[in-house]
Image (cartoon, grey):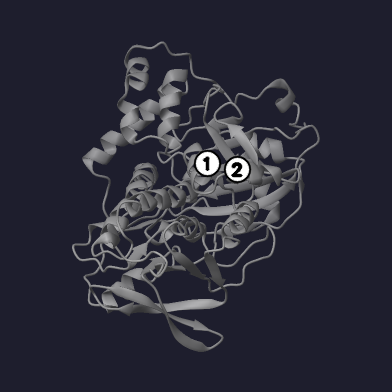
Amino acid sequence: MPDSSTTRRPTAVVIGASAAGLFTAAMLTEFADVTIIERDRLPDGPGPRRGVPQTRHAHLVWSGGVNAFNELLPGFTDAAVAQGARLVRIMGDMISRAPNEVWFRRFLSTHHRNLVCSRDLLDFVLRERVLNHERVTLRQTTTALGLEGDATHVTGVHAREADQDFVLPADLVVDASGRGSHAAQWLAGLGLPKVTEREVNAGVTYATRLFKAPTGAGDNFPLVNVQANPAKAPGQGGIILPIENNQWLVTLAGTRGGEPTTDPAAFVPFALGFGDPIIGRLLHKAEPISDVITTRSTANRRRYFEKMKRWPDGFLVMGDAIAAYNPVYGHGLTVAAQGAIAVRDVLRSKDVTARGTALHLQRAAGRPVAAAWDLAVGQDAFYPGASQTPPTPLERFLARFVDKAVETGARNPRAMGALLDVMSMEKPATRLFSRDMLIPMLFGPQKSHLQGPPLREDERAVIQP
């Protein structure tokens, strides 16, 4: 046995201080000394940062993500709530219309709690928890240029800081640089085969504006969510997210031919034009406190790194660099945290420097990616022009089954629990085929469908004539 006092601790370099990069760095401190390289300069407080196209738009962290956050960083949720975030009961604190235009009843779940706040606040709490760790070093304004090594073993990163190029050696290099990742090109440059990729792009444009919460809304006003219907192109929908500082963060969305614009005068009329005008009515006399921000960076894009037959030791891809999703489904942050946990579990039985470990890590990171991908593509693939290949017969069958599951969940609390287990990424999709779903689906009992949004009287009073 080597003398532990002289054994060198492994080193890791994480490319990108994204959420995925920070979760991965936090996890890796158990096994290595970690350096994060970030091309931008990070804000000192809860402010927007470059390189995060969704930072100004609505974000949800499903309960599967909340659990993963707290497992990686104990006390994370309490820290976020202390600074203004909310833990909301799904569906009790939510008014939501499903893509098939069914309104969900406000059943009270015993354990499903979503974390709700601005992305600026979420990222700030995450940075505070990770970057102050004694085994984490941050190098800002540093750009990754490529990988050092060969097709069998990555040994470091070529980087640039202040016009100076250098090599940063590492036992493990992690690419967590997001949608714009160059990992596929870097691997090809080392002589590895081209990675298989798939894109499903519903053509969604998002427009977001901040409002001062209307008089009477209170601190516990529910989320209001009207989801777009793929069967009625263009699909249009939106969400009101009550966040910190008595603000409503409102994101509207539309697919090709029905996109929202940056015109402030068109924002509320666009919401009034949905299949149900509840969002527009709630905003009709609300006070806007920001400009309208738009983005079109919403395609589902996946790189199947875990299926490559050859994979170099010392390299790992995480987060949006593996797969990025239409943000409307709210699974990106959950996947980032769950992927870090999956990698951690492998490293607890395999040495980070051992031959073949990196391939095991990449396959582990791909498992939560696959679950979120199926949930997103199961809806978006049905929009015109979303993909070069039409949905397969299996995808069509599963989409019909999910629609039926949604209809059942909207009318039965047992079925709703099963549906939320899957949507929150707490349990795999096979949960939808459990007794809790199938018995109500086939035999009942089921309540009648709601004819409109389930607002309570005090909530309805916020709508001004």
Q: Distance from label 2 to label 1 (Cα)? A: 7 Å
Give amino acid for label 1.
Val
Is there any visible trace of residue 235 in the rendered image? no
- 274 shown above or below 314: above
Q: Which residue is mark 2?
A: 77
Element class at badge 2 = helix
Q: Which residue is mark 1?
A: 66
Q: Quadrant of residue 462?
A: top right
- Identify the disc placed on residue 185: none
Is the residue under label 1 in contact with that under label 2 (CB below 8 Å)? yes
Is there any visible trace of residue 252 in the rendered image? yes
Give the residue displayed 24% in from the left and 69% down from the top: 194
**In the rendered view of the protein, which quadrant contains the N terminus?**
bottom left
- 153 shown above or below 284: below
Give the residue furthest to the left. Answer: 309
Give the residue displayed 77% in from the left and 40% down from the top: 285
Give the residue furthest to the bottom. Answer: 164
Give amino acid for label 2.
Thr
Element class at badge 1 = helix
Rate crowding at label 2 as few (under 14), some (14 to 19) or many (20 or more) other CA atoms within 10 Å: some
Measured as percent of width and height from the top left, residue 52 is found at 55, 62
Q: Quadrant of residue 81?
A: top right
Give the residue displayed 37% in from the left and 19% down from the top: 436
Of residues 256 and 430, the one drawn nearer to the viewer in this rendering: 430
Measured as percent of width and height from the top left, residue 39 is found at 53, 74
Measured as percent of width and height from the top left, residue 198 is found at 30, 57
Q: Is residue 137 left or right of residue 278?
A: left
